[in-house]
Image (cartoon, helix red, strand yellow):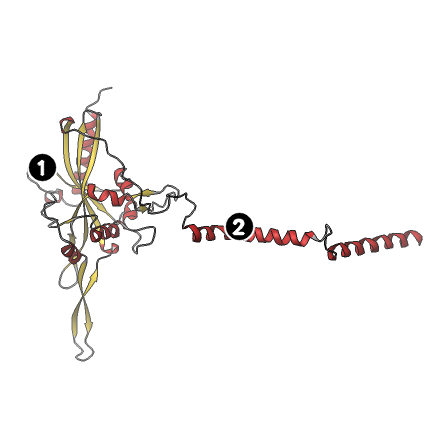
Amino acid sequence: MKSSTRIALFFLLTATATVNAQTVPGTAGAAKPDSLNSTNSIINTSMQAPLSIKEQTGQTVFGPGEGHGNLQRKPIPLAPVREADVMWSKRVWRTLDLREKMNHPFYFPLEPRRDLQSLFDIIKSGIRSGQITAFGNPALDDEFNSPMSKTDAEAIFVRLDSSMSIDPFTGLEQMYKYKTELSAGDVLQYWIKEDWFLDKQRGVMDVRILGICPLVAKYNEKGEVEGLKPLFWIYFPEARPLLATKDVYLGINNGQRMSFDDIFMKRIFSSYVHKESNVYDRWVNSYSTGLDALMESERIKESMMDFESDLWHY
């Protein structure tokens, strides 16, 4: 009986001391709730830190000057080429189809965002701000001889649409016409004009993009699609400073932030040749159609590659 009484008395005294330590300020036990509160506050602060830093400084996880749409970014410098060093050259025109998956970075996003824009939205804003010059008569003249004024360029950005509806008063079907502004979703293809040449000084085959032309769907009076219509040409070297400041979303690695100038210069797009420089000044689709036209496009590309490889002996 005595031993059991001693054990019960020991546990009673221990519990009483613990309660007193938690209620009396200045003891070691009293700091435990405060430490828990401070730990919780640190956790909450760390969870909210990225949001508060972004609100206060306007920066993301990137360092200063590395945010999306860096206005200080410069175009990739090109190697100087002397005209006397060009031993061979060929001019080709390519079609960049935005319906291909590899070309989706040029097409999306359809609505401009703060950090990302489609290629057409960038070109349109550049023309309106005067940073890019649009050249008219794109179907017949791709030599940049017809610069357009801002008024003429604005007229191109407006499209006349029509729709059929029932008149509520007469009950007859009527056609209504209205104006809408061209958006990135209306552009289906781009034409790219470029020069391939052999530089004997560096011993390499190189390429220079000269111009870009957006194409939209062409509608008849009934609202049916009849084909594609080119809008205007832009001189690519003039547009490079603006394209270099605009980020593009490749969807593979978000840490690999590239600009539109980068993907053009590094040839990160899919295209096919629809015309090469020839004595008849004719297009591929004028003498080949369907699968034969695609095979002719591949033949032109392979002929340029073979020309380069045939220059070297191993």
Where residue 167 appears, x then y in whole percent? 19, 76
In the image: residue 96, left or right of residue 84: right
For the N terminus, give its image quadrant: bottom right
In the rendered image, the residue lying farthest to the right is: 2
For the C terminus, give its image quadrant: top left
Please state which amino acid type lies under the numbered disc 2.
Ser
Please state which of the two labelled residues, at mark 2 or mark 1, is closer to the viewer. Answer: 2
Q: What element does badge 2 sit on? A: helix
Q: What element does badge 1 sit on? A: loop
Where residue 201 appears, x then y in whole percent? 20, 24
Q: Which residue is mark 1?
A: 278
Q: Which residue is mark 2?
A: 46
Where residue 124 appears, x then y in whole percent? 22, 52
- Above or below for 208 versus 126: above
Please state which amino acid type lies under the numbered disc 1.
Asn
Q: Give the camera-side residue of 99 and 88.
A: 88
